Amino acid sequence: MSRSPVPFLDTTIQIERVTAIRTRQQTIARELAGKRVITSSYVLGEYKRTLVRDAIVLYNLVQKTEELFDVETQIAQLFNKRSVSRCLLLWATLHRQGIYERKKILRSLHTYITHGLVNRFMFGIDEILNTTECGLAKEGPVLEQTDYQLRTHCTRRVKECLLAERCHEQRSSLQTLVERLRDHPEATLARIATLCAQILQDPDMARGRNCTAYLGDLVIALELPTEAALYTTNHRHFAPLCAYLGKQLYFPANSAPITV
Amino acid sequence: MERILSLTQARSQLPALVKAAAESDEPIVISTRNEPKALLIGYQAFQRQQRLQREGARYYFKALLAKADLLLQTADENQYQVGAPELYLFLVQFEKIMYALWETAEAISQPHALVASQLCDLSRLYLAGEDQPQPTQFAPLLQIIHLLSRDTITMEEAAEADRYLLANGINTMPPIHNDFASLYEEAEEDEPEP
């Protein structure tokens, strides 16, 4: 990049900033040092419904499992493959640190859930854009008796964000994506093209389950300001999206630019 | 002398027992199958006990903070280097104190417990060799110990303490190995909503 654009942190890089191994965390911190760093309320909502939610899942599981050694079995029995991997990695992390007592495990998770994870999301951020006014970003974990609850999905029937309006304003970008991504070999991107076509007919189609389950990358790419560059680990999805939308993607030092 | 009653006895004379418990400092023990199971205690006596427990916890907490303060000051003054046996001995002691500090902080306040829990996690990260404490980090840790010595801390101050430690290169949250972030890259569900 010839000029130094403002880095806009997406959800994957925010998760990396908090959870990656120390050398990786230091690399990210070095690359952001001295720059004005931004992110968005939508990214915060996504962060909460991924990392914070998984910490809550583990908390509730530890709370409910009679014997601690059954926690792994419960994880394997209750969740899908990727959720199992995430929960087991979180669990292993606590154990690697030498935390074996239920009381301390719950306290550490409670600290992350109520305070630590969002605090770290905010660390070093100069501005949080609120283009979509995401309702889920305002949600916080609530302790109900012994378990934590967090609303991680919204419904199209209840309007609590401006995503439809933002999509309507960006009709030409959506049209471009329909044309460019329609036959993309990557299924996730082809699905985004299908959904873009539906959103062009009815912008409200962007809200609800489509937004939380399938359109995360699109929403982030659309809300990315022109003077900013997206800082993400998910180049596979964002490289084509940003290229077609004429947005900048931030390439960390020593990494080769990705061909679309 | 404790008064012990069976559940059946207690049930039949509950109003009188409540009056007796409220007027006296003596708790009434309620048993089932000859085993003591619960205590009926006057509300004022209960409040007094709670206060004494909190005061005791505060006293012990302050003693632990003094120990931690001394330990960190010594480490700071001697600038223990990574790899030095003194550093390992320091870490073993630090972990013990931080664990006790966290357990006691639970009886003091939520923000005290949050900060103490993070210090406890940090001490374990150090002992596990996940992170190495640098000589420049003892002074910021001392600042946090001083924060804990305050009678009241707000949640915002607890969050600020975490950011202060991070800004000084002290990360109390353990890293997650493997490519954890990539596990969030794909959509969770298969088909879009019709």
Image (cartoon, coloured by chain):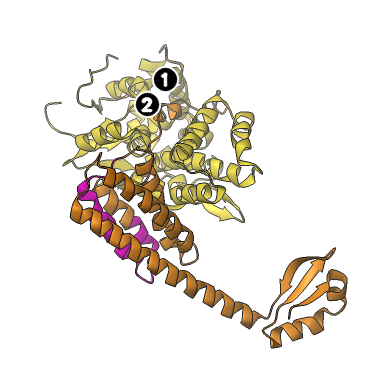
Chain colours: A yellow, B orange
Which mark is nearer the camera, 1 or 2? Answer: 1
Q: Nearer the viewer, residue B142 or A113?
A: B142
Q: Residue at x 42, y 44 (%)?
A: A134
Left or right, A244 with respect to A114, comes to left
Q: Point out the stretch of residues depicted in magenta.
A: B132-160
Q: Are marks 1 and 2 on the same chain?
A: yes
Q: Which of the two labelled residues, at mark 1 and mark 2, occupies the earlier sequence position?
A: 2
Looking at the rendered structure, the secondary structure element under dot 2 is helix
Q: Residue at x 23, y 45 (%)?
A: B134
Disc 2: host chain: A
Label of residue A124 in the image = none
Gap in Å between the C-alphas at discs 1 and 2?
Answer: 13 Å
Task: Indicate the amino acid at tag 1.
Answer: Leu
Disc 1: host chain: A
Q: In the rendered structure, does residue B189 fall within the stretch colored magenta?
A: no
Asked if A119 appears above or below B176 in the picture, the reply is below
Label of residue A174 in the image = 2
Task: Indicate the amino acid at tag 2.
Answer: Leu
- In the rendered image, the residue lying farthest to the front is B85
- In the rendered image, the residue lying farthest to the left is A2
Asked whether residue A147 is in view, the answer is yes
- Number of numbered labels in the structure image: 2
Q: Which residue is mark 1?
A: A189
Q: Nearer the viewer, residue B29 or A57?
A: B29
Left or right, A132 with respect to B18, comes to left
- In the rendered image, the quadrant that contains the N terminus of chain B is bottom right
Image quarter of residue B191:
top right
Q: Nearer the viewer, residue B97 or A2?
A: B97
Residue A173 on image: x %, y %: 33, 27
